[in-house]
Image (tube, helix red, strand yellow):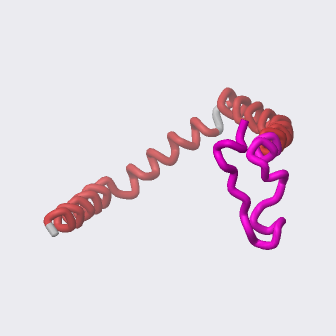
Amino acid sequence: MRGRILLVIGFGAGYVLGAKAGRQRYEQIASAADKVWNNPTVKKQRHEVQHMVETQAPKLVEQAKGVAGDAMSKVGGKGKGRRGNGGTTEIARPEDVS
């Protein structure tokens, strides 16, 4: 109960302090963030990262599929999951895993 009371007091204090900062401070922070976001250097880096993600994501997906397939074959699942074999799941025993 004491923790809840402290939590409510903390929220109340945060609300009061935030309200005192007011709209003017919010506008000041938003303006500074907008300047950083639209800075030519930052904009260039954003585009470079977006391009890298767009080109590398398909490669990573294929690599993950390959690793997952290798793991499945090691544990003896051979691609069968919950839906692939009538709702049952195969469980590898320690002696089956090399």
Front residue of 77/70: it is 77
Magenta stretch encompasses residue 95: yes
Magenta stretch encompasses residue 8: no
Judge from the rendering whether residue 79 lies leftward or rightward of residue 20; answer left or right.
right
Identify whether 65 is placed above or below 36.
below
Front residue of 42/52: it is 52
Front residue of 44/49: it is 49
Residue 49: image x %, image y %? 73, 34
Residue sitting at x 76%, y 72%:
87
* Residue found at the very far front of the displayed protein: 95
> Image quarter for residue 23?
bottom left
Quarter of the image where the N terminus is located: bottom left
Residue sitting at x 23%, y 59%:
10
Quarter of the image where the C terminus is located: top right
Identify whether 57 is placed above or below 14.
above
Residue sitting at x 21%, y 67%:
4
> Image quarter for residue 37?
top right
Region of the chain picked out in magenta, as a range = 69-98
Residue sitting at x 39%, y 53%:
24
Residue 54: image x %, image y %? 82, 40
Would residue 54 be seen by someone viewing this image from the given angle? Answer: no
Residue 84: image x %, image y %? 83, 65
Main SS class of the magenta portion in the image: loop
Judge from the rendering whether residue 23 lies leftward or rightward of residue 76; answer left or right.
left
Would residue 59 be seen by someone viewing this image from the given angle? Answer: yes
Front residue of 64/45: it is 64
Residue 95: image x %, image y %? 67, 42
